[in-house]
């Protein structure tokens, strides 16, 4: 494609996108106003299913199908990136000796923060239905916590703590469990991803029906995805070398 | 409240400009991480803690780490090729 044709194509697509964006923004309620049609619909719907965190109610209950799409995109893009980054022909994987040198103070902070980060991540995943956060945020926090081991310790230490098979399985199982909960909703409530579990008393950890279950399986999937993706980049950086020829 | 909001918006615009004006991509990863923190502040001011948490994990930790790793791999690849060319 010539430069001119590319520019023309971009201007067509960009023009339509800009027009739609402006039309959408003009139709929105004013910034900071008290008129919130979406809130007026979302909050009662969340409360009726015992979900204190309305954002999670939207993500895992009212629009759970959108989250299902997003999780599928996440797993597909991770698979794509890992396929691109695998050792190519003419490259071999080696395990170099530990060359990491870290400041004592960095090590100390890392060793203090790593368990705290992991506990925080688990907390964010498990309380997704009642406090800010949820599976995605908690999964990312957990993945970040695991990689503190690389920042403050060494790559071999990270490799020991991170059996790749387990994370690959976790990623797939998380995605499959999301679909399974959706199918169970089809049986239990008549609609895919319907909230069919009892909702209990408002504000309790098990009060949200399927919201908390979906949050947990998304947490597992996101943790697996983030670790697998970062591992592919780490392998290219640290252990994959071109063969001398 | 409005003053804090304006301050957060100005900070975000300023931090974003710094990211754009940073020349070396390796240094850009660091400014991008700092920009992520400012964005977290803005989301908190706008009462969106869920989004703030996502941005904190993805924008300030994982994306800069991926950028750093990718840049390092490219640099090493280029050094390898140079060495082979000289031989």
Image (cartoon, coloured by chain):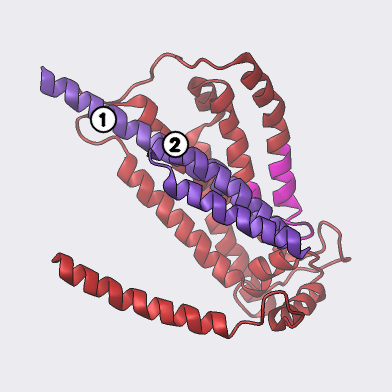
Which region is colored magenta? A119-138
Q: CA distance from mark 2 to mark 1?
A: 19 Å
Q: Which chain is purple?
A: B
- Chain assignment, label 2: B
Residue A8 percent across, percent down from the top left: 23, 74
User: From this viewpoint, is residue B37 visible?
Assistant: yes
Task: Report the front residue among A188 and A80.
Answer: A80
Apparent side of residue B24 relative to residue A100 in the rendered image (left or right): left
Apparent side of residue A115 relative to residue A7 in the rendered image (left or right): right
For the image, the number of numbered tags is 2
- Would you name the residue on which mark 1 appears? B77
Q: Which mark is residue A230?
A: none
Residue B62 percent across, percent down from the top left: 52, 43
- Colour in which chain A is drawn: red
User: From this viewpoint, is residue A245 visible?
Assistant: no
For the C terminus of chain A, the image quarter is top left
Determine the residue positioned at 19% across, 30% down: A90
Indicate the quadrant where residue A133 lies: bottom right
Determine the residue positioned at 68% across, 61% down: B6
Residue B56 percent across, percent down from the top left: 62, 47
Determine the residue positioned at 38% across, 26% down: A238
């Amino acid at each position: 494609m010539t430069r001119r044709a590319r520019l023309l194509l971009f201007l067509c697509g960009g023009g339509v996108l800009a027009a739609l964006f402006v039309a959408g923004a003009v139709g929105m309620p004013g910034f900071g106003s008290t008129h919130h049609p979406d809130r007026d619909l979302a909050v009662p719907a969340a409360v009726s299913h015992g979900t204190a965190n309305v954002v999670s109610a939207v993500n895992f209950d009212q629009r759970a199908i959108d989250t299902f799409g997003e999780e599928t995109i996440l797993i597909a893009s991770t698979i794509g990136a890992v396929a691109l980054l695998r050792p190519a022909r003419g490259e071999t994987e080696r395990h170099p000796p530990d060359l990491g040198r870290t400041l004592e103070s960095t090590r100390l902070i890392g060793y203090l923060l790593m368990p705290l980060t992991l506990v925080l991540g688990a907390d964010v995943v498990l309380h997704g239905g009642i406090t800010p956060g949820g599976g995605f945020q908690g999964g990312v926090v957990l993945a970040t916590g695991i990689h503190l081991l690389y920042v403050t310790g060494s790559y071999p230490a990270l490799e020991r703590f991170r059996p790749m098979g387990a994370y690959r399985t976790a990623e797939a199982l998380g995605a499959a469990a999301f679909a399974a909960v959706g199918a169970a909703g089809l049986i239990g409530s008549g609609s895919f991803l319907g909230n069919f579990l009892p909702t209990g008393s408002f504000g309790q950890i098990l009060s949200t029906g399927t919201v908390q279950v979906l949050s947990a399986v998304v947490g597992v999937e996101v943790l697996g995805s983030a670790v697998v993706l970062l591992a592919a980049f780490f392998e290219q950086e640290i252990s994959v070398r071109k063969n001398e020829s | 409240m409005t003053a804090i909001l304006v301050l957060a918006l100005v900070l975000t615009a300023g931090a974003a400009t710094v990211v754009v004006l940073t020349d070396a991509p390796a240094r850009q990863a660091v400014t991008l991480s700092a920009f992520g923190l400012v964005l977290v502040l803005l989301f908190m001011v706008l009462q969106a803690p869920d989004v703030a948490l996502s941005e904190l994990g993805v924008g300030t930790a994982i994306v800069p780490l991926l950028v750093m790793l990718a840049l390092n791999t490219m640099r090493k690849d280029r050094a390898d090729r140079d060495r082979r060319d000289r031989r």
